[in-house]
Amino acid sequence: MASLPNLHCASAGKLVRTARPFAPARPAARTAAVACKTSASPTAAEAGRRQALQLATAAAAAVLFPGSAHAAKVNKEYTPVKDAQDGYSFVYLFGWQEVAVKGQDVVYKDVIEPLESVSVSITKTDKENVSEFGPAPEVAYTLADRVLTPPSQEVKVLEVKETVRDGRDYIEFEFAAKAGNYIRHALAVVTVGNGNFYTLVTGANERRWDKIRPRLEEIAKSFTVVDRFAAT
């Protein structure tokens, strides 16, 4: 099994970002630009790489989505979703339609702009916390590069951060994937709970990113995973 690519993190607290995720003049290269807040020792990093690869294998049939105690503005722009059986909730944009996608627990998308969508996937895991899969930047890159996009697409991870919502740890990241004739810009949120690894992904065509980004951020922030059964 191939090892994870080396990730060079920016200085603490600084975001690695360009005006556009892919500059036309630059040669296509499968690289990641990642902002991180902490650095691991060589031993911890190596263990993290192994854990992240396990994550990629476990999630190979999956894709997508986040968790959050943030209450998105549930108004005429958003429709709430609550799955009590699987223990998660989020909101999606009003007017998006539910579609069936193999390997996904649920998917909603715009019928006119098909790249504008949100999806949630659930994969069984024996881990109890998302941090057990390794350093957040490596987990994000593994998912973006090997799980959430086809192998033929060039991927760049633009931002990675770790958050805590209602006592649960989440990894949130932003990435872009370049296909032959379009770029999809996306936000993803992952967490662990109820014996599952949850992934939420929401995104859009790069040409509409600046316009729709605030709405997609609300979707990502709204994602929340809760314990399905209270302790007895």
Image (tube, helix red, strand yellow):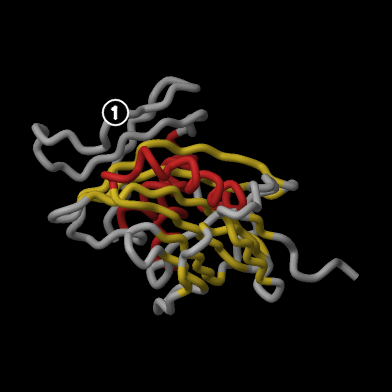
The residue carrying mark 1 is 18
Q: Residues within 10 Å of mark 1 (few under 14, many from 20)?
A: few
In the rendered image, residue 211, in percent from the top left (x then y), is placed at 38, 41
Towards the viewer: 213 or 102:
213
Q: Quadrant of the N terminus?
A: bottom left
Q: Residue furthest right?
A: 232
Q: Amino acid at mark 1?
A: Thr
Identified at 52% across, 51% down, the residue is 189
Identified at 35% across, 45% down, the residue is 175
Identified at 32% across, 34% down, the residue is 33
Q: How many marks?
A: 1
Up the image or down, 206 lies above or below 14; here it is below
The kind of secondary structure element at disc 1 is: loop
The image quadrant that residue 112 belongs to is: bottom left
In the rendered image, residue 103, in percent from the top left (x then y), is placed at 43, 76
Up the image or down, 34 lies above or below 77; here it is above
In the rendered image, residue 17, in percent from the top left (x then y), is placed at 34, 29
Residue 165 can be seen in this image: yes
Residue 135 can be seen in this image: no
- Report the side of 209 relative to 76 (left or right): left
